[in-house]
Image (spheres, coloured by chain):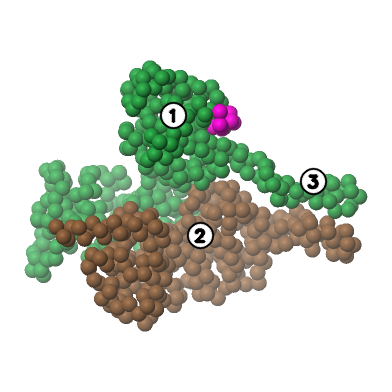
Chain colours: A green, B brown
Amino acid sequence: MFVNFFLELRQAKVPVSIKEYLALMEGMDRGVSDYSVDDFYFLSRAILVKDERNLDKFDRVFGHVFKGLEAVPGEGITAEIPEEWLRKLAEKLLTEEEKKQIEALGGWEKLMETLKKRLEEQQKRHQGGSKWIGTAGTSPFGAHGFNPEGVRIGQDKSREGRAVKVWDKREYKNLDDTVEIGTRNIKIALRRLRKFAREGAEVELDMPDTIRSTARNAGYLDIKMVAERRNKVKLLILFDIGGSMDAHIRVCEELFSAARSEFKHLEFFYFHNCLYEKLWKDNRRRHVDTFSTAQLLHTYPADYKVLFVGDASMSPYEIAYPGGSVEHWNEEAGQTWIQRVSDTYRSMVWLNPVPERHWSYTPSIQLLQQLSSNRMFPLTLGGLDSAMKELNK
Amino acid sequence: MKFTGTDSYVASDDLRVAVNAAIALQRPLLIKGEPGTGKTVLAHEVAKALKAPIIEWHIKSTTKAQQGLYEYDAVSRLRDSQLGDERVKDIGNYIKRGKLWDGFTAAERPVLLIDEIDKADIEFPNDLLLELDRMEFYVYETQQVIKAEQRPIVMITSNNEKELPDAFLRRCFFHYIRFPDRETMTQIVDVHFPDLQRNLLREALNVFYDIREVPGLKKKPSTSELLDWLKLLMVEDMSPDALRSKDSKQLIPPLHGALLKNEQDVHLFERLAFMARREQRQ
């Protein structure tokens, strides 16, 4: 029975190993938990789950194995319910009689069956009323309403406090993030790009050298100092901003803030769609405070690593021809400028927030892919990782 | 040895089971959770409940794993050798014990708190794998093995700033302190301020949970902030009515400085107050 539980956990991609399983057995053997299901649930959760993101998966597997309620992927009833339907808008208070009335409505099975039917029928957000799925109504389905036998969908706090079992509450649902790219993860990926070197003021005691020179000094103490080890990677980030990039603003913000705290030598500039002769640092003053790209090439030495962030989605003319820019008349084509950047800086990558599978449908992405000599990577954790490897070469 | 919470700490059932499992099976317990939900306090309370001594090791970004074991003070030995000090003949005089060493050799089984392990360098947890697993380490300078006679109760807290390596996680038990619901929160406040007025507490909790619900807050206020705020309310002798007033001018709660910790959040609140007022006028 427990082996089964263990195997199902592995199947549901909760990373558990034999070591943890044995620890659980040991715990049971020593009688750490009382002989109740709740305690067993708490014990196994503490031992088997190591990350809050896996708590929800664990709850589902536990519910399935020890109750046979529902399969992990949510067989039978699966429906993506738009969150806006369920967002709390109002609250309705019912009288005692009304409450009783609803209680009289059929059992669990019947409710689920009806829910399935409703989900198929219903197309719009709904609030109030007593049939459709929505918020604050008296229908058995939805959030923030009152029906003791109701099915709670996407409701984040317990209102009537009658949920059946702890694991069935699935309180950790919003902690499950399998694909989400967060600042922390980005930092981990950016760490690949570390190159330590000793530079600057000498503040640390250099033990081997001190010992060596003391010995040479006939035992007379001669202290040697060295500079602190620092990450000496220099990074130049060029962000595409505005227009089609607005959809990706969040992930770019996260990347930016992670990079900022990770690198000491970090410079950033903005451009629009494609790189031309001008860049800017403050998007509000983009027409006033500009920085010429030619100057950029002279200002930052060739040991800077260049990171382009942009969706590269535009008309191919904007890249290939002089005057192609949508905003101004550019004397030289975008590709000339990108070529110059890649000539100056040996390490250069392009991060693209557009999912990789769509790349082949956009000619401008392919064009820039070529221009950056196939060093374009998707802005996902995996992509970031490979991009950092590329920059480290 | 069983931990059941103390009169100054409300432990939920799942937390109790996790702590007791870690004590009984002698594994380190990794505690995560939002900042201010009582991760560090837990170790102190466990020590208090079990009447065990507590050894705290606070981790900083510059902390090395070796510092937890021991450090060899070569410089003072060199200096002593110049001065012809007798102590110089025994290298053991220059070995400084770290927190883990203290924990391993303590007379009573201690609680060892490794606080904010995520602050250290990424390799830090990996460097402690063997030490935490076997509870022993080797001192090269004196060629002795330090082995724990009784395995200390190890509690590790993390704020999630860095991902911890799998090999490390596999050796720990894990508990995520969930943000307490209203009922638990009332208990927690009771423990800290037993003579707080009932209705003031109710109103304060309403305001508090409302603030947590506001979408887009950079830093949601947590338990420790609530406790600070309540203390302030009590000192200022605020009446429950002042909190209750749904007047939109009062949308920013009194003494909000204890709850909202950065200016963006305060701005967000002011904007919401402004919008609510405009809606009322229409």
Q: In this picture, which residue range is highlighted in magenta?
A: A298-305
Residue B70 is drawn in which quadrant? bottom right
SS for dot 1 = strand
Q: Nearer the viewer, residue B136 or B34?
A: B34
B98 lies above or below A372: below
Image coordinates of residue A258 in percent, x first then y, are 47, 44
Verify CB contact (< 8 Å) between mark 1 and mark 3. Answer: no
Q: What type is the residue that disc 1 sits on?
A: Lys
Chain letter for mark 1, please: A
Which residue is at the front of the view, B73 or B216?
B216
Residue A209 image label:
3
Crowding near the residue tagged with mark 2, few <14, some 14–19, many ≥20 C-alpha atoms within 10 Å = many
Residue at position x 12%, y 66% from top? A94
**Residue at the right extreme, as displayed:** A218
The residue beneath circle 1 is: A278
Q: Is A359 located above or below residue B259 in the figure?
A: above
Residue A305 higher or lower than A191, as above or below: above
Q: Is residue A270 visible?
A: yes
Residue drawn at the location 56% of the way across and 43% of the way down = A264
> Mark 2 — residue?
B157
